[in-house]
Amino acid sequence: MEIETLITMILIFGVCIGGFVYSLYRSSKED
Amino acid sequence: MDKKESFSRWGIIFAGLGMAVGTGNLWRFPRIVSQYGGGAFMIAWIIFLIIWALPLLTIELAIGKKTRLGVIGSFGKMIGQNFAWMGTFVAFVTAAITFYYTVVTGWCVKYFFATCFQGLIRKEPIQYWEVFTSSWEPIGFHFVAICIGCSIIYFGVVKGIERANKILIPSLLILLLIAVVRSLTLPGAIQGLNFLFSPNLSQLGDPKLWLNALSQAAWSTGAGWGLMLTYGVYSRKNENPLLTSTTLGFGNNFVSLLAAITVIPTVFSFFAGQNMAQERVLDVMRQGNEGLTFKWLPILFSKIPSGSFFLALFFLALCFAAFSSLIAQLEMISRIFIDSGLTRKRAVTIVGIGCFLLGIPSALSIGFFNNQDWVWGLGLMVSGAFFIILVLKVGPRKFREEIISSPEHKIKLGRGFDYLVTFILPIQLIAVLLWWFWDSYSADPGNWMKIFTTASVGTVLFQWAVAITVFIVFNKVITKKIFREKNGN
């Protein structure tokens, strides 16, 4: 796999998973 | 009964994910992302998630939580009955999508059973598709899809919607993860990943890429549909709309990515084995609404070990995704009837019959189906615009401080929201629309405004204009019962 593909893949997945997990974590703190 | 029901903390997350995760993720996203250049499209799609879908989902959830009314009632309660026609338009766009969405759900059910019991993988899929769609069968499966969807919402919010989504969403994720592992272990799959995640930045200059990224962000997350607003009606008092919407938005995009890395590497792997050029592979990927999923996937899966099993798995996942969204759509429409004083049982029955009858043209004609997908898929931008107008009429600051946030919330929106709603959202909407007009005119000056074609600017504007005119003229008549009920007369 090309390095730029790998970086883009990690970034795009990172944004989605990171956003999901972080907001889930913060909403659990609200309760 | 309905207004006393409310989702549990996990209930609204599963229901919201179910609402957002639908065929848009599994059936539309892989096709659109390959049509518009893979990586470059992803960048635009993530941008629109953040500056379009998430703010709209937050706004919707906050409105539902505040008014405890469906879409039409909410617009009337927030900005006055004279503007309730905007809510009627939003509801109609979603209903119009539901009419053909039930047809797609029916296709998924049919293909799942055909894979399991009719040996679909051994048949000639393109011919099979032609025979299926030219028969009366799509109407039968359209009916089955509506019956299943209506049965779920008939049981109400907790016993119906929440319970169904708590089964559908985890099952869908497990199925997808299995499919991802299979797809990525195929020979040549890496070429698919290279295509998907290598951004060709020059493609960002294509207006259609941006228009479709916006349409996909709206289509897939459910932003501007009024669905999140409807689920907001049943949210807990201390629900934080910002955090819940962000969870759903990012979760939805994650599922879309899983779908893309299931489908696209499988396609590339198959054609690599046939020594086919990338352009030809992309031609297959660019096939219309039904082409990739229902014609090509059975061929692709027939060439991989245990293909029949994995094809059945894929169609089962598609069924789960379709139903999890369909029940949100049916609930959105039913909620409006419940607001006007009908019992849930009666509302669900009316919605079921109405959706069945109005979905028949799409079940019978792929041309009509594609026209409706084009017109109302883009109509979500107008729906989004109406939500923005609502916030602007209330006042962005007041909306943010009094309707989205509550004193008990630890995380609150900052002033950036006011600028986003006042400037960025309207500007991006107008820019994308103007860009689209110009591009359509440049591409086909003679036909771009023709009304009776499957996909033109003319057919979109004509159908939007007819709907808006009817809803403005008959606003009082349409909304009378809801407001009479609300005022307790």
Image (cartoon, helix red, strand yellow):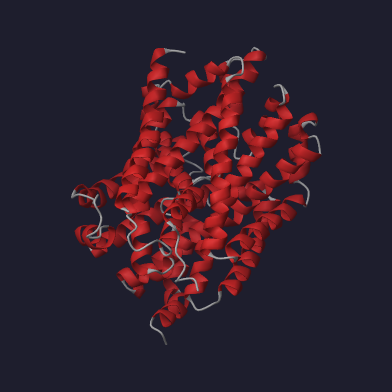
Q: Is residue B348 above or below residue B484?
A: above
Residue in the foreground of this view, choosing between A15 and B375: A15
The percent position of residue B120, horizontal first and vertical second, equals: 77, 35
* The quadrant where residue B127 appears: top right
Residue B441 at least partly seen: no
Residue in the foreground of this view, choosing between B154 and B348: B154
Q: How many numbered circles does the render carry?
A: 0
The percent position of residue B182, horizontal first and vertical second, equals: 61, 24
Q: Is residue B292 above or below residue B418?
A: above
The percent position of residue B113, horizontal first and vertical second, equals: 75, 43
The percent position of residue B217, horizontal first and vertical second, equals: 42, 42
Residue in the foreground of this view, choosing between B350 and B81: B350
* The quadrant where residue B206 appears: top left
Look at 42% across and 87% down and name the residue there. B489
Look at 54% across and 50% down and name the residue there. B166
Q: Is residue B25 left or right of residue A16?
A: right
Q: Is residue B407 left or right of residue B259?
A: left
Residue B291 at least partly seen: yes
Look at 59% across and 51% down and name the residue there. B323
Q: Is residue B123 left or right of residue B488?
A: right
